[in-house]
Image: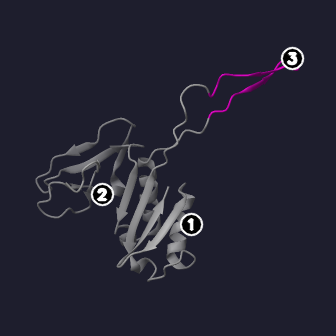
Amino acid sequence: DAHAGIDDTPIDLCPQEGNARVMQCDFLELALSAPGSEAEIVPSADFPGGCLRSLPAGSFDAVALSLVLSYLPTPQQRGAMIRKARSLLPTPDLPRLPTTEWGADGSVTRGSEGQGEAPRLSRGLLLIVDTFSVDGRQSNRNGGYVQQWINEIEAEGFVFLRHTVLQRSHALAFA
C-alpha cells in the first residue's frame, strides 16, 4: 500500500468522480473543532468519500497544499488558506521557566513552575507544490512572487525551510 504508515486525510474541492478515498471539501469553508474531537464527515450522493465539514485544530503533523494557492483569485484567500493550514498544525507550548520570587529580606526563591512534563516542541510542516505560473522558472528564492509568498507565509508564523524547482512546479517547505 502506497500509504502504509501514513494516516492521511485527502480532500479536494471537486474530487475525481468515483474516488471514494478523497473527501469533498472547500478548505476555506472548513470548520475547525476543538483539539481531540472527531472530524465531521457527511455522506454524499455525489461524492463517495463524503463531504468533510470540520477537523480538529492542531491535529496534523503536516499539511500539503498541492496546486491550489495559485488558483485562488485573491491574496486574501491565499492568506486565509495559509492561516487555516497553520491552525491544523500543532502549536508548541512555550517553555515554562521557573519563577523567581524576592522575599522581603532580599532572599530569592525559585518556584516549581516549569517542572513536570517537557514542553511540546513539534511545530508541524507546511508543504506547498504549485505551478510555474507563480514565478516562471526562477529557481532562487530571491526574486519575484516566490519570495513574496515566502515572506507572507513566514508572516503567518512559519519558518521557511526550502524551495525546490521540480520538473513542472515549485515546491516549498515550512515549519
Can you give x and y, in whole percent of width and height, for residue 32 in the image?
A: 37, 44
Mark 2 and mark 1 lie on one chain; the one further toward the N terminus is 2
Query: Magenta-highlighted stretch: main secondary structure?
Result: loop
Between residue 123 and residue 131, name the one nearer to us.
123
Q: Is 110 in the magenta?
A: yes
Rendered image: mark on residue 104: 3
**Part of the protein shown in magenta:** 96-114
Residue 174 on the magenta segment: no
The location of residue 103, given as percent across then percent down, is: 83, 18
Give above or below for 144 relative to 72. Answer: below
Query: Residue 159 lies in what quarter of the image?
Result: bottom right
Q: Which mark is residue 61?
A: none
15 with respect to 95 (left or right): left
Neighbour class for label 3 at 10 Å: few (<14), some, many (≥20)? few
Instruction: Please give the residue where the numbered disc 1 appears in the rendered image.
Output: 151
Vertical comparison of 140 with 29: above or below: below
Q: Secondary structure at mark 3?
A: loop
Q: Quadrant of residue 15?
A: bottom left
Of residues 51 and 63, which is closer to you in this image?
63
Location of the N terminus by quadrant is bottom left
Residue that label 2 marks: 26
Q: Amino acid at mark 3?
A: Ala
Label 1 neighbourhood size at 10 Å, few (<14), some (14-19), many (20+)? Answer: some
Contact flag, marks 3 and 2 (Cβ < 8 Å): no
Give the left or right position of residue 149, taking residue 44 as reference. Answer: right
Task: Name the residue: 57% across, 59% down.
Answer: 155
Q: Between disc 3 and disc 1, whose residue precedes?
A: 3
Q: Amino acid at mark 1?
A: Asn
